[in-house]
Image (cartoon, helix red, strand yellow):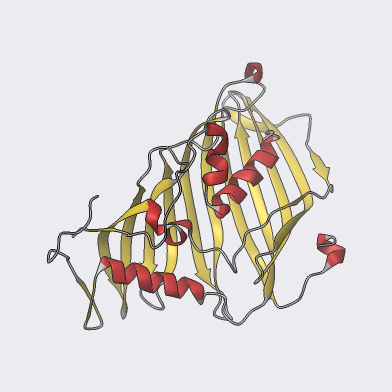
Amino acid sequence: MQEQWRHRPSRPRGIASTHPSLLVEQSPRFLRAVLFVLALVLGAGASRALAQGETDTVHVRQKKLTLEEIIERCEQGEKTKLAGHRDMQYTVNLRVIFYWEKKKETRDIVFRAFSDDTGFSRSVKAGEVVQRYELRDSVWVVSKDEGEESGIQVESDGFGDFVEMPFFLEEQQEFHFTLLDRTVERDHVIFKIGFVPKSEFKALPSGTVYVDTDNYRIVHEEFDFETNPFPLLLKDIKGFSRHWEELPGGEWVYTRILMEVELRNVAFGRLPRRAAASILRENFEFDKGYDARIFGER
């Protein structure tokens, strides 16, 4: 069963620039933050509307819902995921593995991050461990250069959990949506919804989102880029996904991001061919206030 819905914009939209240098700035904030972290590690400088009367419906607890209603409920569910809290802190564990032809390098970096309901966010690098390997007789062995550890602190924008919704909900007018499937788990339904960008020139991904009808919360997202946000550095971005979980206190946060990128072979082979990255968020604490001793002056 497939149902399509074209969101009708509620406000006028200007003409977006398609100049390559602005593609990253046109990307959703969460995507820019993820790509910024990857760039920091790399050292880079840087369809159709439904015909009237033809709307398919699905049944959830005896109530018929259209795709538009599902998305509206999901939007409301996202607005309540951190309701009642003023701020939160958490730990970000970033692991990146770089691959050359006969060597690889792992980097494990730990950040402590803060965000609050004003939209302010900051992350501070707490430490880094680098390990290098060489390929010998088809086996990866630790190289003589056993890596390094750095305690240098690097400040960057964090993730705006309190004010930022998933980009395809925040910018619905940019996408076409399709109801792909539904599965029943216990006493509620999981909806599988696909989305594709309307524009071929913006650095927006297409993807698939899974929505749990218990409070209409997103549980998993998978993204696929047709327009490369870093065309001078990256050949391809693949395996990009984000997973959400409910915390013991009832808060709903994303806890895991996975991605893999293929890099352009520049600088005479000094850059790796590809890199795989994982971001794990844990140790969430709420309403502790901003600690300038950890994050610096605001």
Quarter of the image with the N terminus is: bottom left
Query: Horizontal placement of 77 versus 64: left or right?
Result: right
Residue at coordinates 45% horizontally, 44% vertically from top-left? 15
Furthest toward the left, the residue is 53
Residue placed furthest toward the top = 268
Q: In which quarter of the image is residue 43?
A: top right
Q: Can residue 106 be seen in this view?
A: no
Q: In this view, does 190 lie to the left or right of 82?
A: left
Find residue 100 and report its horizontal and vertical position in percent. 60, 26
Q: Which residue is drawn at 48% across and 36% down?
A: 18
Observer able to see residue 192: yes
Q: Name above or below for residue 8 compared with residue 152.
A: below
Q: How many labels does the image show?
A: 0
The picture places residue 28, in percent across and down from the top left corner, at 53, 52
Q: Which residue lies furthest to the right in this view?
A: 293
- In front of the other: 41 or 21: 21
Residue depicted at 35% across the width and 46% down the height: 198
Q: Which quadrant is the C terminus positioned in?
A: bottom right
